[in-house]
Image: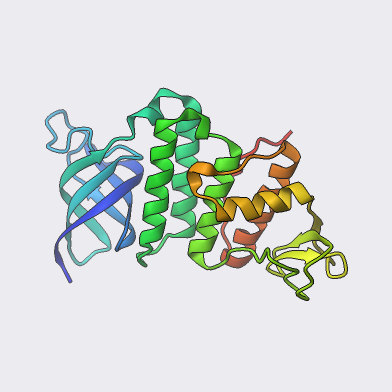
Amino acid sequence: MPGPLSTEAIVLRSIRYGEADRILHLYTPDRGRVSAIAKGIRRSRSRFGARLEPFFHVRAHLHEGRSELLTVTGVDTITTHAGLREHAVTLDAAARACDAVSRLFETSDPHPEVFRLLANELALLAGDPGQARAGNGLAFRIKLLLAAGIVPHLAACASCGESEHLQGYSAAAGGIVCNACEGAAFPISEESYRFLIDALGRPLAQAPDASERALRQAERAIGETVEFHANVRWRPLLHTT
C-alpha cells in the first residue's frame, strides 16, 4: 500500500536524472529490485550527501506513491564497502556481481537469500582483493542460479540419469550429460565438472579455483544455462582472446 517504507538495500546502480536528481536501482531483501528517485542528491547541500553510491549497503527510507518509482526520504549507511574502491579489479568484480543480480532478479519478487548473497560477495571483495578472481565470480553466479531455481543438474546425466561417463554439458537438457546423451552438448573436462560441484557446495568465501581452460568451460555452462532458462545474458568474467 502507498505510504512510508523502510528497508535495507544495496545500491546496484545510480543514474543522473535532470539537473540534480538521481534514479537509483536498489536491491532489497523483501521487495526485490526497486527503483527510486533521490531528489536533489547532486546538490552540495543535499541531505543524502554521498550515502547512496553504488555498492553501498544502507537502510533506505522511501515513500511509495502510485507510480513504480519510489522516492527516497532518508538514508542510513550500514557499510560503504570502501575497500572496493581501492582496486580496479574489485570495483569491476562488484559491478559485475550487481549487474548479474539486476538482470536475473529484475522484479519486485522477494529473494532475501539473493540479498544476503550479494551483501556477502561485496563484503568479501571489499575485504580481500584476492577474491576478485574468476573462480569467485563464477561461484557467485552459480549460487544465483540456485536461488532462481535453475541450478544445473550435476549429480548424474540430466537426460538419462547415468552416473558415469559424464563428459558433456547441455543447458537444454538441464546440466551435465553422459557420452550417450551428449547430442548438442559441448565437451566438459573433469576439472571443470568438479569446479561446478565445488562452487555450488562450498561457502562463497571458499570458492574453488581451476585452470583457465576449466573456468572457461564452467563460464560457458553457467552462461548458457541462464540464457536458455531465463533469457538473460550476463557480462563475461573471463576476457576473450
Q: Tell whether 89 sits left or right of 124.
A: right
- Residue 137 image point, x, y percent: 55, 43
Residue 73 visible in the displayed image: yes
Q: Tell whether 22 sits left or right of 220.
A: left
Residue 151, compared with residue 161, is above or below; it is above
Residue 120, compared with residue 93, is above or below; it is below
Q: Residue at x 69, y 43 (%)?
A: 215
Quadrant position of the N terminus in the picture? bottom left
Quarter of the image where one finds residue 240: top right
- Residue 163 image point, x, y percent: 77, 68
Between 226 and 17, the residue placed more toward the observer is 226
Work out which residue is located at the far bottom of the displayed protein and give it: 160
Residue 211, compared with residue 140, is above or below; it is above
Residue 233 visible in the displayed image: no
Between 79 and 63, the residue placed more toward the observer is 79
Q: Which residue is drawn at 20% across and 67% down?
A: 66
Quadrant position of the C terminus in the picture? top right
Q: Residue at x 21, y 40 (%)?
A: 77
* Number of numbered discs on residues: 0
Work out which residue is located at the far top of the displayed protein and give it: 86
Is the image coloured rainbow, by chain, by secondary structure, or in one colour? rainbow
Q: Tell whether 11 sits left or right of 190.
A: left
- Residue 111 image point, x, y percent: 38, 63
- Residue 174 image point, x, y percent: 68, 68
Quarter of the image where one finds residue 40: top left
Between 80 and 211, the residue placed more toward the observer is 211
Q: Which residue is drawn at 49% across and 34% down?
A: 92
Q: Tell whether 11 sits left or right of 191.
A: left
